[in-house]
Amino acid sequence: MKSLALLLLAAAAHAAITGTVTNQSTGKPQAGATVALYKLGTATGLELIDQAKSDAQGAFTINQAVQGPHLIRTAFDGVTYNHMLPPGQPTTGLALEVYNASLQPGAAKVSKHMLLFEPTAGQLGVSETFLFTNDGKTAWNDPEKGTLKFFIPGGASKPDVKATAPGGMALGTPILKTNRSDVFAADFAIKPGETRFDVTYTVPYIAGADYAGKIVTQDENTYLIVPNGVALKGENLNDLGAEPRTQAHIYGLTANVYKVQLTGAVAPAPADAGAGADQPASEEGPRIEQIMPRINSKVVPILCAALGILALGFVLLYRAKGPQA
């Protein structure tokens, strides 16, 4: 029994996390990358446990035993890359990937841009989702000027921006000012793969009044969306019909500006719908709850999935109809 205990103690003492960092831009092992081990805590968030540098062959070793969920965060060329370590997953021979970073967009572009308008009594909630695709082998990162540029109208509430890296989780993102008072930027790297940005804010709402905006980031496909029960009209719009499940109405925008009129309002949430009906209140926080109406937690994910499935059909319909006079 004593010898077994000694063996277990020896195994724990020699437990380590090992692996290799490969630069996918060059296809070679990457030296000098910082590999950090974090413990995932419910109360304290991420807790740094230990870190190491990759050597000339890209190899690294972190002499720590892992119990419970952990995160490996690799930093290289100003960009971080996350790798989850769920309980029971091997911690040796990890293959971590990084990319060279550039101040230029390169192959990164907005493949879809969706604006969801949710009018209520005196307030219009606007939720914009940008889907970036980066088919290249370089990450776009510009901490000084930001990557995504987005328009916020005068009189709007302070915007909330969240970004989701390829295979990652939604994270709060710093907002940068630009040389235009109505245009802001998000400081978040666009890595190879698909990156999603969610921008939410509110503006005063009067039914039937003009609401104008502009598209400041070049988009391949831009959609204006209203929930069931809300009507939208304006110029430079292609009516793409209703999404079958939510009956939200979708319009393709054929210009880089819009002026629309909305009528109707989103039905209020049921009185017994608590803060945790869709997500725990601790995850959203008061400000996000105010900016993002409760219906948004259901409509936006469904529409994103629906547009992903129906994107080809929408694009074909958009091209077939062409710009309307």
Image (cartoon, rainbow, N blue to C red):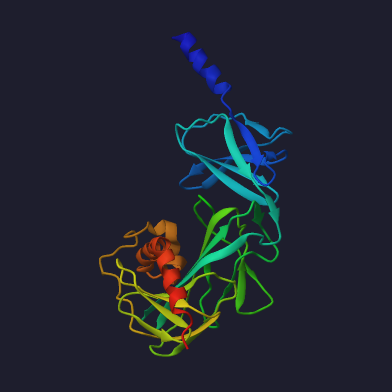
Task: Evaluate whether residue 270 shows in this view.
Answer: yes
Q: In front: 303, or 34? A: 303
Task: Evaluate whether residue 126 shows in this view.
Answer: no
Q: Residue at x 37, y 58 (%)?
A: 279
Q: In front: 174, or 27? A: 27
On the image, the x and y values in percent for residue 59 come to 67, 32
Q: Residue at x 43, y 64 (%)?
A: 312
Looking at the image, residue 275 lies above or below residue 85: below
On the image, the x and y values in percent for residue 232 come to 39, 83
Q: Residue at x 56, y 65 (%)?
A: 110
Which residue in the rendered view is the most extreme toward the front? 320
On the image, the x and y values in percent for residue 200 come to 48, 70
Looking at the image, residue 188 lies above or below residue 127: above
Residue 106 sits in which quadrant?
bottom right
Looking at the image, residue 213 lies above or below residue 59: below
Q: Residue at x 54, y 46 (%)?
A: 46
Which residue in the rendered view is the most extreme toward the bottom? 209
On the image, the x and y values in percent for residue 179 come to 69, 77
Q: In front: 241, or 260? A: 241
